[in-house]
Image (spheres, grey):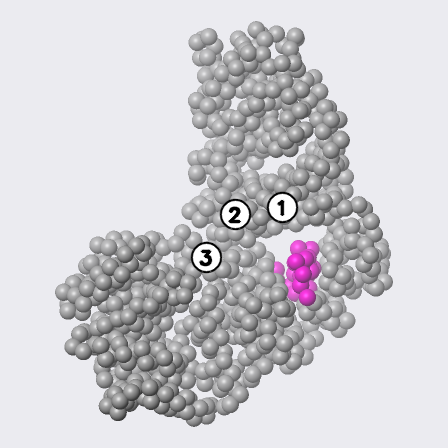
Amino acid sequence: MRKLKTVHEHTASQLQKKTKRLTARLLQGKEPDFLRQHARALDDYFRQAFETSMVGPRMDISKNPYAIIALGGYGREEQCIHSDVDLLFLFKKKVPTEAEGLIQEMVYPLWDIGLDVGYATRSLRECIALASKDFEILTPILDARFICGWSLLYSELMDQVRQKITGKRSRTIINWLVEKNNLRHLQFGDSAYLLEPNLKEGQGGLRDYHTMLWIGQIDLNLKQPRDLEYLGLLSHEEFQTLQSSLAFIWKVRNRIHHFCGRKCDQLNFENQIKLADAMNYKPTNGQQPVERFLGDLHGRMEFLKNQHLMFLHELGLEKKRRRKKRKSQKQTRVNGLEVIEWGMLNFDTAEKLMESPDLLMRIFEESARLKIPLSAEAKRLVKEFLPKINAKYRKDPAVMKSFERILAAPAPKFNVLNEMLNTGFLVRFIPEFRSIINRIQYDEYHLYPVDKHLLRTVNTVKNFGTAKDSSLEPLCGQIYGELKNKMPLLWAALLHDIGKGEIEEGHAESGAALVKKRLTHMGLGPEVVDNVAFLVRDHLFLVKTATRRDIYDEETAILAARRIKGTERLKMLYLLTVADSLSTGPMAWNEWTAALLRDFFLKVLNVLEKGELATAEAVEIVEGKKARIISAAGTKKAKKHVAELLDVMSPRYLLYTPADEMTEHIKLYNQLGDSEFIWDIKHSADAGTRTVTICAKDRPGLIARIAGVFTLHNIDILDVQVFTWRNHIALDIFKVKPPPDQIMEDEKWRRAEQKLAKALANGINLVSALKKKVPVYGQFGQRVSRRPHRVRVDNKSSSFFTIIEVFTYDFPGLLFSITDALFNCGLNIWVAKIATKADQVVDVFYVWDLNGQKIDETDQVAAIKAAVLERLPAME
């Protein structure tokens, strides 16, 4: 027995060496047929082990025939580097006791070399009984493949599966497969749009392809994948694209297995850049290698997802229950189109399409009107007739009107624009779309490829007009209803990022030029073209200004109003800004951004409606607040004290701080006395944030010291408002996350207070303390765009202040590092704004020097930039 074990161990060792050679060739790009060759290497092992078995002869295969059968992915010959090896030891009659010895001979040596082998030992009767009750057992058997033993037993198994299970219960099994698929998609999501997609289980993953094969076997007696083409479910071109898409996904999956050293289907952040490098992607057209790689992967998974959905539609399986074949009650009014079985649109004949190419657009318009999809045949004809779409076609007024009706049509779950994109029609109709297809932006901010993001933005805009989705930003529904002409907004939603195909930085400007040229060629009027070009050029203006400028400074709103010029344009720009943010991904939109943007929009709208002389109204608001606060002060002496205090407060503070908060701040100031500072901490309604209001004697570097102390106590700063009164009092309002461990939170705040007092008394070196606290600053998020840090100095946007913008990546102590650098440059900070975009941060500071002057000398500006950059960690 020991001698035989040695033989099997030797055979397993030979398998291991062969697998290593295959893997090495795969990684060198010299083994395109790796999956099949790897499976066959395993087959060779089992056949050799079967031939040399000592247990096998004792079981007498002639009396109780048995077979060793590959299941699942191994059965399909889809054996990746670390895929499971699933086996069935099948016996004609009862499983003999010696079967355990056979398994020890064959399976144990594979375990010893690290293979993940799973097996089942069953009689034929048991196998059929279990598979008929549990479809989780049935599906691997559908992929069964004979390896060695009694081949007739394998044939009998497959015959009985067809006769007793799939032949009799096909509808039940297929319904179960469709429902299981739906649940799987809900659990793992749409892999094409996930930051870390699952290549197997997500929508657009390999399991969608397997489901097509299983349903094909059960419903259509599919024998091999090629039968999808032979049976007319896929065209020749579609099958070829399917095969290349699968090959790419498997190539990526093998690389993930190699990097992880184990079976893994999740494309995690840490492997994405490594994969792009390993697969020899190079930077092209402003895209990083990893962005090009992820774009290609997205395109393949998107194709697989669409083929799977089309397959289910063709068989009437897109719903949970299979429907009886019947004509739809919906009928088309367009001559040359018809509604066929399963309620899908098709062309009457290809000849009709040849005679009337406008049907290419009309079929999509009818799809939007009737809310039914195109049939697979219709999509194939659209692709075949794409050359008919030329400059003359695009300029046809009837075709343009038809497209605009599609653009404005309510968007149900089924989106016609997606169908136009997937068939290639949209790219042919608007050629500039070609350069943004599957274009990925590698950060945690942009969830969708550029082309899909544009379609989602159109949908979001249209949903503003519905009661269902106006709750996302209630003001949007009202504004959308007020627009006299919605078409420029819809065109801008569709095209606002079109410039990203040419250039990432400055894409709004280049996009506006592209849009102006394209829409003019398509015959749109000059007023519409100008409005769309304006919206595309300035689609980032409102959100950048709201998050990076002092919106409480009336000058900011006035400059914005001068740039936008009209209320209709402002309303469209606001709706586009909100829709763009909502359609980018969850990191791009939050309550804080929404509130800033909404407030800024209303301020600019007020200036446009009432003119720049709105200052009189501002004075009236301030005087009203002062009167209310003074009257509530109580005694004559107290009223005088409050009035004197109000006179030293900044106009910005007086105008935009609510009266009740001002009263609280006055109480805080009255408690300051001889102390260096006093603070008040309030919990938000949801307990997720804290507002720390600090009243302190003003001094250079105050903000830096507060930020440093907060970092030492693990308190993340979300936003800060800086107000300086003319009596040398600073009122700084920090919005922060609470300490990580909120047990005994009050005690932690007390310790932070003591540390700040020590820092203000120069009793602690914050730079040294932070270096010990955060020894390595360079640990940025795993998925970042690797763009270098930037410092921008703006002396144009404010009449009184120099504005410094710092573009970097978030790390502990960031705000302290920047503000301390500004302090060391001899600058006073009057306004600070923090705009966090996923892992990227834009910190903005309104500053002047110690003499109250702007910093506009070239050498001063250069020194400030260098000082800030020196405090930021080196990029890896």
At a point 46% along the width and 12% down the height, the residue shown is 5
Asked if residue 777 shows in the view, the reply is no
Q: Residue at label 1?
A: 182
Q: Check disc 1 and give the amino acid type.
A: Asn
Q: Check disc 2 and give the amino acid type.
A: Pro
Where does residue 842 sit, x and y in percent of width and height?
38, 67
2 vs 3, front mark: 2
User: Extreme front residue here?
Assistant: 635
Dot 2: what SS? loop
State left or right for residue 187 relative to residue 875: right
| Segment tinted magenta in the rendering | 410-434
State the residue in front, 699 or 112. 699
Q: Quarter-wise, where is residue 55 in the image?
A: top right
Residue 443's disc number: 3
Q: Earlier in the sequence, mark 2 or mark 3?
A: 2
| Above or below: residue 413 compared with residue 531 | above
Label 2 environment density (alpha carbons within 10 Å; few <14, some 14–19, many ≥20): many
Q: Earlier in the sequence, mark 2 or mark 1?
A: 1
State the residue in front, 573 or 394. 573
At a point 81% along the width and 54% down the height, the residue shown is 328
- Figure disc tally: 3
Q: Residue at label 2?
A: 197
Residue 423's disc number: none
Dot 1: what SS? helix
| Above or below: residue 600 compared with residue 634 | above
Where does residue 254 sit, x and y in percent of width and height?
51, 37
Name the chief secondary structure element in magenta.
helix
Q: Quarter-wise, where is residue 125 in the image?
A: top right
State the residue in front, 637 or 694. 637
State the residue in front, 596 or 144. 596
